[in-house]
Amino acid sequence: MFALITSGVLALSFVLAAVLKYKFIAKKKSLLGRHVLVTGGSSGIGKCIALEAAKIGANVTIVARNESRLLSALEEIKGQCLNNDQKFKYLSVDLAGDYSMVKTTLNIAINEMGPLYLFINCAGMAICGTLEEVSTNDIMKMINTNLISTIQATKAIVDEMKQNGFGSIVITSSLASFCGIYGLSVYSATKFALRGFAEALSMETKSFGVKVTLALPPDTDTPGYANESKDKPIETLLISATAKLFTPEEVGRKILQDTLNGCFFSTVGLEGHMMTISCAGMAPYTSYLELICQVFCGGILRLITVYYQYLFDKIIEKCKLEREHKKI
Ligand SMILES: NC(=O)c1ccc[n+]([C@@H]2O[C@H](COP(=O)([O-])OP(=O)(O)OC[C@H]3O[C@@H](n4cnc5c(N)ncnc54)[C@H](OP(=O)(O)O)[C@@H]3O)[C@@H](O)[C@H]2O)c1
Ligand SMILES: *[C@@H]1O[C@H](CO)[C@@H](O)[C@H](O)[C@H]1NC(C)=O
Ligand SMILES: *[C@@H]1O[C@H](CO)[C@@H](O)[C@H](O)[C@H]1NC(C)=O
Ligand SMILES: *[C@@H]1O[C@H](CO)[C@@H](O)[C@H](O)[C@H]1NC(C)=O
């Protein structure tokens, strides 16, 4: 028991060291004159990444479908610019639609705004419910928005980035790509898939000088989150209530910072850091400290994840009993 507690404390201090490293060592990088393109940049986390990029001098393009939301987000982003030479543009396209439209649209962005320095995939959505409750239409919507959009958009720009020999691609997944959650089966499936996509893409682009970052946001207070929470099963609500709800500003800022620092995993919060350490698998390693944590804390963190699973199972069991009780 004593050994267990000692190693637990040791594991946590490593995690804390990792968190502190990000807080204090990370230097504020400049994006002066660089082109940053954000898909899903009209709302939530994507909009906050675009705002942060504008603050440090980037020329920013945002891509989404709804023009009126794009227009008002772009006004907000322009308002955060560092100087008057920065350029801003929005483009409307359905990234899950016809590939030639996606390709044409992203080419326009590159031609007008310059070679891509950061390409940030942030378009995505969740529809909650147990598998039998989710319609086949909603299943296709999630697969198309989360997976197909990201794959099509990235395919459209990757060749040019490899030829340029620089740049970073961000794939926005979720902590649900480490951990399947009740009421989010199809969503988790699309986010697990994005992790595989990011790992393979990273291997394909590394020797060309193009980096890949897998963003793993925790629950974040965005318009998308508010919408998906409307039909969350009580189990899903109670499970997510065991972790903190983050603001899109802090999540967006952290994704941009980790991307500029060349990290493969980007997350915020204690749970997020614990999960990137315990679920490292064969992910590319991008920092020695992170590798040391993974090697020395993996075992004890596995025990902590089992404790969380026990808590989640208890929640689900309790809800099931309450449902049965109501029926009688
Ligand atoms: N919020 C969270 O708690 C949370 C947690 C983990 C991961 N994430 C992930 O983080 C990303 C951003 O989430 P968010 O909560 O900030 O979402 P959000 O507020 O709903 O914003 C989603 C953005 O994606 C765009 N979009 C959706 N479908 C598109 C399509 N087919 N083509 C082009 N653009 C499209 C939307 O604009 P239009 O509708 O106008 O196209 C909007 O700009 C998503 O990938 C999400 O899965 C979020
Ligand atoms: C990007 O912004 C800078 C100013 O920050 C500007 O001088 C440059 O021309 C812009 N690049 C492109 C391709 O428009
Ligand atoms: C676009 O967004 C605005 C503001 O949220 C909304 O009123 C409008 O109905 C949307 N348009 C479409 C075509 O979805
Ligand atoms: C909001 O949720 C509904 C149903 O859960 C879904 O059909 C719709 O696409 C969602 N809207 C957005 C903008 O995510």
Image: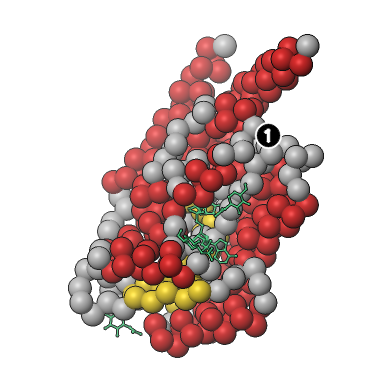
In the rendered image, residue 130, in percent from the top left (x then y), is placed at 73, 37
- Ligand 2 image position (quadrant): bottom left
In the rendered image, residue 88, in percent from the top left (x then y), is placed at 34, 75
Residue displayed at 44% across by 36% down: 245
Within 8 Å of ligand 1, the CB of disc 1?
Answer: no
Instruction: Give the answer, above or below, for where 315 lies relative to 78.
Output: above
Q: Residues within 10 Å of mark 1 (few under 14, many from 20)?
A: many
Residue designated by label 1: 182
Specify whether 274 is left or right of 317. left
Quadrant in the picture for the C terminus: top right
Residue displayed at 57% across by 44% down: 228
In this view, which residue lies farthest toward the left? 83
Instruction: Using the image as rendered, state which of residue 96 and residue 214 is in the foreground.
Output: 96
SS of the residue under disc 1: loop
- In this view of the protein, can residue 209 be seen by the observer? no
- In this view of the protein, can residue 185 be seen by the observer? yes
Numbered disc total: 1
In the rendered image, residue 31, in percent from the top left (x then y), is placed at 31, 70
Specify whether 70 is left or right of 283. left
Residue displayed at 68% across by 23% down: 316
Quadrant in the picture for the N terminus: top right
Specify whether 114 is left or right of 328. left
Instruction: Using the image as rendered, state which of residue 20 and residue 220 is in the foreground.
Output: 220
The image quarter containing residue 42 is: bottom left
In the rendered image, residue 159, in percent from the top left (x then y), is placed at 59, 81
Instruction: Give the answer, above or below, for where 151 lies relative to 7.
Output: below
Residue displayed at 57% across by 26% down: 238
How was this image coloured? secondary structure
Dot 1 amino acid type: Tyr
